[in-house]
Amino acid sequence: MDGSALLLLKQLREFNRHPVEGISAGLIEESNPYAWNVILVGPSDTLYEGGFFKARLDFPKEYPIKPPKMKFISEIWHPNIEKNGDVCISILHEPGVDQFGYERASERWSPVQSVETILLSVLSMLSDPNCDSAANIDASIMWRDDRAAFKKKVGECVRKTLEEM
């Protein structure tokens, strides 16, 4: 087993030994440490509260030099999550300078990040969308211009996650 696989298994053991409230994670298949299932519980006092959002993390063989990709499997409506579920957050962007100038290099991926810091960042993002760097333009516009419709749409997503459980 290579170094990145061993590191991922170590991070999973640590994560499960010291669980973080609102987050559950595990391997999709025991033989593949590069693909994880994740469940994020919608944070209290947010529109996502009470939802159980399924996602997956796919790690490259070059982890931790390169960041994983995260994709929500459950339907979720958020300015920083593409309609297909792909998560767009600075911590998951390749290290280096942002060609568009939206992010500082210090906000982007760094090998010192861990699965825990990634998932905590995504939970934080649910509480505080960054509409200046939206991945889902429709959700961003709705967040900005019609909070009631946004709240309704998110509520529908939360209900669907409960039906899926």
Image: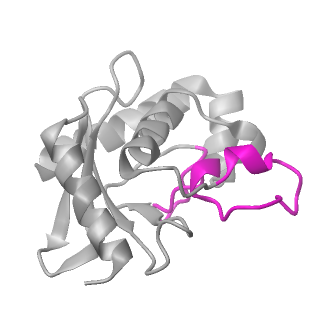
Give the magenta range. Answer: 79-108
Residue 147 lies, in percent from the top left, at: 59, 25
Q: Is residue 13 visible?
A: yes
Residue at 60%, 44% in the rendered image = 79
Q: Residue furthest top?
A: 45
The residue at the point 34 percent across, 40 percent down is: 156
- Locate residue 153, reporting x and y percent: 44, 38
Q: Nearer the viewer, residue 93 or 4?
A: 4
Magenta-drawn stretch, dominant element (helix, strand or loop):
loop
In the image, 90: left or right of 59? right
Q: Position of residue 43 (x, y in %)?
A: 35, 26
Is 121 contained in the magenta span? Answer: no
In the picture provided, is 61 more to the left or to the right than 35? right
Residue 9 appears left or right of 143: left
Q: Is residue 1 above or below residue 66?
A: below
Compared with residue 80, is residue 41 higher up or lower down, i.e. above or below?
Answer: above
Q: How is the image coloured?
A: one colour
140 or 100: nearer the viewer: 100
Taking depth in this image into account, of 111 and 70 the one nearest to the observer is 111
Q: Quadrant of residue 111?
A: bottom right
Measuring from the top left, give residue 1's x and y in whole percent: 25, 84
Residue 89 visible (yes or no): no
